[in-house]
Image (cartoon, rainbow, N blue to C red):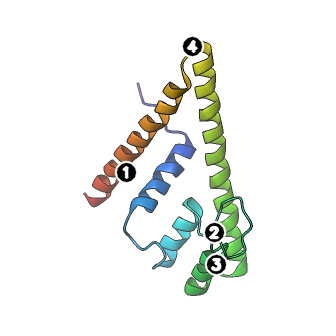
Amino acid sequence: MAEEPAPLVEVFESLARVLTTSSRDWGAYWADAWLYGVLVGWDCEEAHEHDGAWCGGDAATRGMAEQHGWSEDAVARLRRYRAAVRAASAGFEELRAATRQHIAAVYGLPAEMVAGWDAIDKARVTDDTTASSEETSA
């Protein structure tokens, strides 16, 4: 019996982990910068005022656009694609958290156990990243 394909959000998350844990300069070449922009994002995505005091706001994206000759339309398209990936990831995280809370409530599990599941996921992330770097270097 064939294994079910991974949900697309897991694919996005795995690719983002590879990019963010790599020592590669993802801004050096236009194609790499584009992939990074879609999968990880160049803009600050934190929920705060983007006044330059706390973050670069959209300065990194503007810098990439200037460096690689991206038009305003291309930058807008990049941001739409990033928003779609971010929305898929956010929905997945919300679903995962709700599922964990439900399982804990149904089985009367302590909150510490549910929190421990995050540590298991982080270990899996490390394993995925290690496997990815081994696969790409082969």
- Nearest-to-viewer mark from 2 and 4: 4
Q: Residues within 10 Å of mark 2 (few under 14, many from 20)?
A: some
Circles 2 and 1, Cβ within 8 Å, touching? The answer is no
Tell me what residue is drawn at x 50 percent, y 39 percent. Answer: 6
Q: Earlier in the sequence, mark 3 or mark 2?
A: 2
Q: In the rendered structure, which amino acid carries the disc numbered 1?
A: Thr
Q: Name the residue under label 4.
A: 107
Please tell me whether mark 1 sits on a helix, a strand or a loop.
helix
Tell me what residue is drawn at x 37 percent, y 51 percent. Answer: 129
In the rendered image, residue 120, in percent from the top left (x then y), is placed at: 42, 35
The answer to whether 51 appears left or right of 21 in the picture is right
Q: Which of marks 2 and 4 is nearer the N terminus?
A: 2
Figure quadrant of the C terminus: bottom left
- Nearest-to-viewer mark from 1 and 3: 3
Q: Distance between the residues labelled 2 and 4?
A: 41 Å
Q: Distance between the residues labelled 2 and 1?
A: 23 Å
**Mark linked to residue 129:** 1
The answer to whether 108 appears left or right of 73 in the picture is left
Q: Mark 3 points at which residue?
A: 59
Residue 17, relative to residue 68: is it above or below?
A: above
Q: Distance between the residues labelled 1 and 3?
A: 28 Å
